[in-house]
Image (spheres, rainbow, N blue to C red):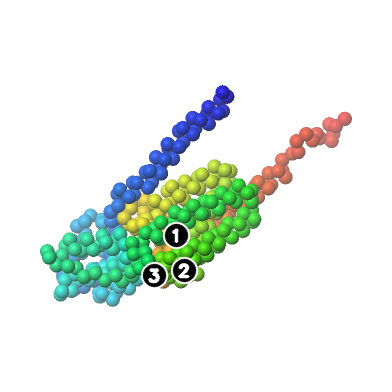
C-alpha cells in the first residue's frame, strides 16, 4: 500500500471520533448545566414587601437580574417589550406572577417554581400569561426544533453553490434565491399550516430568509476563500456549535457562561431570538438579532465575491504551460 492511503486512513480514524466528541460536548454540556444566570425578571409593588422579595431573589447568587417597576402595568409593558421574562407583583393579597410563555416556556415554569417556593405553605400563587405561547405549540417544541433545519438549509445552500462552481455574482444571486424560497415555504408551513408562528407573515418570512442567507453565505464564502474544507468549517460553526449554543429551546440566560452570549452572536441563536420577537412580540427587541444576521450575511457575500475574483484572476495571470519566449524559439 502507498503511504498516502495509509495517512488518509489514520486521518479518518482520528478525525471522526474528535468530531463526535465535539458534538457530544456541544449538545450535552449546555443541557446538563441549565440554570438561571442573570435572568432578567421584574418586581412591582409596595416598597417594603418588594424589597424583601428582591432580597430573596438576590440570595441566589447571580441567578436573577432584578428590574423594579412602580406598577403592574409597567411590569406588563416590560414583558411585552422583552426587557424581562416575567415579573412578580406584590400586593396586600400576596405575590402574583406575570409570565410570557412565548418568550420561553422553560423560563415561565422556572419562575413559577421559584415564586411558589417562597410563598406561604398551602397558598397558590396566581399566574397570568401576558404573552402566551400559541395553542398549537404551547411548549415551544416546534420553534425550538425549527432552527436545526434552517441551519442545515443554509449549509446545504453554501455547499451546493460551491460544488456547482458558481462564483462571484452568480453565487450571490443563487444564495439570495434559495434564502427567499426557503423563507416563503417555511413560513407557509409554520404559520399558514401549523399555526406555530402567529406574527406578521412577511416579517416571519423575511426573518427565515435572512437566517438561511446568514448561514449559507459564510459557508460559501469560506469555501471560496480556502476551498472545500470551508464547507466543513462552516458546518461545524453553524450546526455543531451554533445550534446547541442558540438557547432557543430554553433561553440564552439558562446556558453556561459564556455559551449563551456566544450563541446569540451566531446565526442560529440570533435567528431564534428574531423569530420570537416578530412572531409573538410585534417585533420588540428584534433589532439586535436582525443586525447580527445581517452582518453575517454581508460578510459571507463579501467573501463569496472576493473569493470568486481571486479564482477568476488566477488563470489569467498564470503563464501558459509549454509556451516559450519568442527570443528563445528556434
Q: Do residues under tags 1 and 2 come within 8 Å of each other at their CB atoms?
A: no
Foreground: 76 or 3? 3
In the current view of this chain or complex, which residue is farthest to the right?
330
Q: Which numbered disc flags the more N-terminal residue, 3 or 2?
A: 2
Q: CA distance from mark 3 to mark 2?
A: 18 Å
Q: CA distance from mark 1 to mark 2?
A: 20 Å
Percent position of residue 267, x then y:
46, 56
> What residue sits 56% from the left and 23% below the top?
1
Percent position of residue 258, x then y:
35, 51
Q: Which numbered disc flags the more N-terminal residue, 1 or 2?
A: 2
**Residue beneath label 2, please?**
192
**Residue beneath label 3, please?**
281
Q: Do residues under tags 3 and 2 come within 8 Å of each other at their CB atoms?
A: no
Q: In the displayed structure, does residue 272 sit left or right of residue 218? A: left
> What residue sits 37% from the left and 59% below the top?
141
Q: Which numbered disc flags the more N-terminal residue, 1 or 3?
A: 1
Percent position of residue 326, x then y:
84, 35
> What residue sits 55% from the left and 28% below the top?
5
Q: Quadrant of residue 93?
A: bottom left
Foreground: 191 or 171? 191
The C terminus - image quarter: top right
- Can you tell which of label 1 and label 2 is closer to the viewer? 2
Look at the image and tell me whether residue 221 can be seen: no
Q: Which mark is residue 271?
A: 1
Amino acid at each position: 500500500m502507498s503511504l498516502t492511503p495509509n495517512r488518509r486512513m489514520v486521518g479518518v480514524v482520528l478525525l471522526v471520533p474528535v468530531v463526535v466528541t465535539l458534538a457530544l460536548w456541544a449538545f450535552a454540556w449546555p443541557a446538563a448545566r441549565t440554570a438561571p444566570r442573570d435572568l432578567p425578571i421584574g418586581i412591582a409593588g409596595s416598597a417594603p414587601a418588594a424589597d424583601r422579595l428582591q432580597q430573596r431573589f438576590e440570595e441566589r447568587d447571580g441567578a436573577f437580574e432584578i428590574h423594579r417597576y412602580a406598577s403592574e402595568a409597567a411590569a406588563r409593558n416590560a414583558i411585552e417589550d422583552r426587557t424581562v421574562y416575567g415579573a412578580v407583583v406584590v400586593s396586600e393579597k400576596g405575590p402574583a406572577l406575570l409570565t410570557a410563555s412565548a418568550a420561553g416556556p422553560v423560563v415561565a415554569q422556572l419562575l413559577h417554581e421559584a415564586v411558589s417556593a417562597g410563598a406561604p405553605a398551602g397558598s397558590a400563587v396566581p399566574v397570568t400569561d401576558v404573552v402566551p405561547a400559541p395553542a398549537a405549540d404551547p411548549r415551544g417544541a416546534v420553534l425550538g426544533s425549527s432552527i436545526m433545519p434552517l441551519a442545515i438549509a443554509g449549509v446545504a445552500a453554501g455547499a451546493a453553490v460551491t460544488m456547482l462552481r458558481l462564483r462571484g455574482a452568480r453565487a450571490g444571486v443563487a444564495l439570495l434565491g434559495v434564502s427567499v424560497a426557503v423563507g416563503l415555504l417555511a413560513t407557509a408551513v409554520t404559520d399558514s399550516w401549523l399555526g406555530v408562528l402567529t406574527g406578521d407573515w412577511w416579517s416571519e418570512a423575511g426573518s427565515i430568509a435572512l437566517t438561511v442567507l446568514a448561514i449559507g453565505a459564510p459557508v460559501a464564502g469560506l469555501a471560496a476563500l480556502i476551498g472545500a474544507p470551508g464547507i466543513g468549517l462552516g458546518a461545524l460553526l453553524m450546526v455543531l456549535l451554533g445550534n446547541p449554543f442558540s438557547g432557543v429551546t430554553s433561553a440564552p440566560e439558562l446556558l453556561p457562561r459564556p455559551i449563551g452570549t456566544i450563541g446569540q452572536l451566531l446565526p442560529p441563536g440570533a435567528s431564534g431570538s428574531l423569530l420570537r420577537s416578530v412572531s409573538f412580540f410585534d417585533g420588540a427587541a428584534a433589532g439586535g438579532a436582525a443586525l447580527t444576521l445581517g452582518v453575517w450575511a454581508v460578510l459571507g457575500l463579501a467573501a463569496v465575491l472576493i473569493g470568486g475574483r481571486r479564482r477568476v484572476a488566477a488563470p489569467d495571470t498564470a503563464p501558459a504551460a509549454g509556451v516559450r519566449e519568442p527570443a528563445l524559439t528556434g
